[in-house]
Amino acid sequence: MQIEKYVEQVLQPKLQGDGGWIEFVSFEDGELTVVFRGECSKCLILHRCVDWIEQQIKADLNKTVRVNAIRKKPYFQDV
Amino acid sequence: MAHIKVVRRSMRPEEWTDLRFGWLKRHVYKEKWEITNLMIRDARQTSEMEFQYYSEEYRPLKKGDMYFTPDGTAFIKADVDIPEELQGQELWFSLKTAAEICVKVNGKYIGGVDPNRERMLLSPYVNDKETLHFDMMGYNRSKPDDERNPESLSVRGCRQIFEGAYICVVNHKVQEFVWDFEILLDIAKSELFNEDYRAFLNRELNNAMNFIDFDSDELSGIEEAKKYVDEVIYANDNYKGNGDVALIAHSHLDVAYYWRRIHAVQKNLRTVLIQLRLMDRYPDFKYTHTQPYVYETLEKYYPEVFEELREKVEKGQFEPVGAMYVEPDCNVPSAESLIRQCLYGQLTYRRMFGKTVNNAWLPDVFGNSWILPQILKKSGVDYFVSNKMSTWNDTNRFPHNNFKWKGIDGSQVLACVPPTHFITWNMPSQIQENWEAYIDKDTGGQTMNMFGYGDGGSGCTEEMIELMHRFDKLSVMPKCEHMGAAEFLERNLKDNESLETWDGELYLEMHRGTFTTKSRLKRTNRRLEYKFRTAEMLSLLRKDDNRKELTDLYKKFLINQFHDILPGSHIHPVYVDAVEDYAEIEKELDRIIGTGSEYFNTLNIKRDAITFVPNKKGSATRYGEKGNWLIPAIAPLSGAKLRSVKGGDDWFTFDGKTVETPYYSLSFAPDGSFENLRDKELDREWTDGRFNKLTLYADCPGNYDAWDILPNYRDKEIPLDIDLPVSLAERDGESVSFRTVLRTDKSRWEMIIRLFRRSRGIEVESIVDWNEKHKLAKVEFDCNVLTRKALCDTSAGYIERETHRNTTWQQARFETCHHKWCDLSEAGGGVALINDGKYGVGFNENSMSLSLLRATIRPDVVSDIGRHNFCYMIYPHADDAVSAGINNIAHQYNVPLVKADVKWDMPDFAPLYLQAAKQSENGEMTVIRLSEQDGRRGRIKLGCKVKLLNMLEDEIGETDVIEYKPFEIITVGI
């Protein structure tokens, strides 16, 4: 499975279930760029989730990636 | 000259006390023995009791390991042999976690832990000489049960670090002293209490702490400190508090919100389990729990826990409250839906516990329709408990807490809207705040203070009960009494003649966006409400006994009316679940409705309004379907063949701007709004400015994004470009339609405007590709009418709303909830607006604005994004809305003709609206529900005896004449 599909079909529903949101942006030279919205965007321990995502991709797709996380906080929480 | 601000950098005495209090809490456990052989298996919940496991095997779980995954459930187990040195002592299991974990030992549910509590008592439930098989199921979420608990907020996040699990022995001396300090420090820090007493407390708490030697291993001096607190602090009764507060234990459980409905099954289990264990330990502890639906899930999936619950109900400790099946939204659901909430809720309680609950318990709902008192009263409910209008109103202070609530028909229930939040943790400052805020001190008796963590359940804690046991020792506190809900309501409200009366809707001055957010849910809810009506009626007439099937479908439907589902205030997966449920329900209802050779009019009025009848060969298009517009002229509750009248299309003219029909001369602006709408029959103009004007506003309400529309939404209007100016689209012998396409840079809005040869109605269909963020779409009508009131349908009669802004009460109601229609009229005529699934409407003098779409991003990042298709009908008329029969026209607009070969052989009950015709729940009779919707009084001679029923289908009398009052809902059995 491609990384983009993996983000949309495997990771996305799990993060959504927690009130979070992840969107694929790009995958180049081993760097997976994703946007986090919703609860993820303000999560104080997002780095743990990012580590988990890297582990999951390794386990499921046998790919070593480095996740570049972009947080998009809602305007009313962007303080 | 430099200004030097004096900043105190040294420790204040109060901070020294706080610091030592923190040290003290570290000594609560005398012994802590770590369980080191825990194993964990990760999974994700896929249905109420099914899980997708991420691995075949369990893996070891050690302190410091990461555990839980996004939306993850974890199964944790261990076989534990209690060390000999701990055997025979009072043992506790402790697990500090951000997750929500239910714990089973040797097959018995022992308790639960979550961010609000970290331990449970083991000893009474296990034999500590046996091997203990621990089985735990935990669910972790980023959003804690209760965001107002700072401790639970600090640990939010979906990947957690395991902090270990322990078998413990509690040092009760320390623990007792910690609770003493907890309560006293809360008072010392609260400005709500007497300043001198707080100074006394700060001084004496420091003195008490001075007895303790924190350098000693044994923490010596605890007894002396405790004695000092008893003899100096508790014994001081020089400071008198006042007030009379009833403490009601409760846990609010959102069936779905930041979690899916499937997760509420275990949230409920954990909540109930924790309360049952507290009851075991504290025989005086009483707890109230709502929503028969969650009782059903417990009974179905955890029968052994349900059996314990039932025992505690019998003992009077566990109190089922809330007659409704779930805690529904009380704005958008129709009267019949609210009746079914009561019917299925009460029948469930009767089956489970043999009792009818006489209260409605709706603390978190976003305002309450004026039709509720009658529905409650006729469903065995005398008492109504809500909360938000007293604590969340953004403009006016709601003037009552304990009062009589008078409904649209004059029915009254006794109401309690407690002065402070329904989630508290029983701290003295919260109780004092409640008393201070209580308005009805002179008339209402005690004030109600609910305590217990909630939103996602959780409930009361050991600490809350322990604090409660100390309140009597504090003269500065209000008098506090722990009791059940029914006891509170009957003692303070029943026969209380001094209570004031509130006659009107309980409008919440907040969350005004919930009438509009998640447009698709609202429209489907409306359509299904009518499909249930049709399916039940046709089943009855065909003598199909599908009661169980219909009840199951109804229950699923009612769950989706929960106050964080239908209003739209939930995360995306909850929306997906609701849409799937609706699709399943609709498919089944369509199957039950079936088909036939004739069109059947399920309404008990003649169908004389223009109606669209689908037909593949039709010459008109609506909702993407071909068909014909016609006037069915089918008699009430009768069937007939339909034939569309073939006529020429020369009944109108259009010169590119103005269309002339038998009724109107209408001049379009290029964007589809009406520059003029001249009524030929009534010889008058209906427009006075913007009319059918689609307008987009910036809609930025802040953190309560899905919930709120703020009064400043009109400050910024977003321009719409015209992609396609108004042009002629379709024409036939009955209708002509015009099409315009508007755009923003992200969205496309196609508007189709239809006029008719034989109807005053002007229908507008919108087909929208909506990709906005923080926008509110409204369609606005400045009517050439002088009026100070609007009429709004409630689904069981109309409510009059002032349209001026004289006082803050009218100003706050800039957006209100209505059902099928609203109307602005003066003597001689007016303009009605009929919809098929829009609920939010604003009025300002002679203007009305129907809210069409929102675009919020919290809690659902993509709320309302996508394709929308909806209609409304502009209906100018002579006389007022009631005389013009707008309600009947709105019924016809919402109730499609169905094909069915059935015969109605009962009276038609006109002029009352036939709201439901169904088999009784016990299968022994036909139940007919009638609703007076025009505000009239009268009688119907039936010519035969019928049973008078309440809404629970209990017989309350017999008659052959139905006497009805304005807005009365009457149920009869035949």
Image (cartoon, helix red, strand yellow):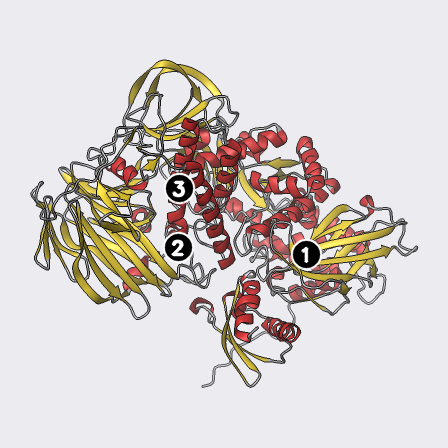
Q: Residue at x 43, y 25 (%)?
A: B927
Quadrant of the image containing the N terminus of chain B: bottom left
Q: Which mark is residue B427?
A: none
- Residue B958 image point, x, y percent: 42, 15
Quadrant assignment for the C terminus of chain B? top left
| Residue B442 seen | no
Judge by depth and name the residue closer to the eye, B162 or B593.
Answer: B593
Name the image quarter holding residue B887: top left
Marks 2 and 1, the one that precedes in the sequence: 1
Q: CA distance from mark 2 to mark 1?
A: 32 Å
Residue B349, percent across and down? 58, 32
Residue wearing tag 3: B506
Instruction: Specify the subunit that label 1 lies on.
Output: B
Up the image or down, B668 lies above or below B244; here it is: below
Which residue is tagged 1? Answer: B138
The residue that label 2 is drawn on is: B517
> Is residue B71 placed above or below B928 in the rendered structure?
below
Mark 2 — on which chain does it sit? B
The amino acid at mark 2 is Thr
Callout 3 amino acid = Leu
Between discs 3 and 1, the one toward the N terminus: 1
Horizontally, residue B890 falls left or right of residue B367, namely left
Label 1: few (<14), some (14–19) or many (≥20) C-alpha neighbours in 10 Å? many
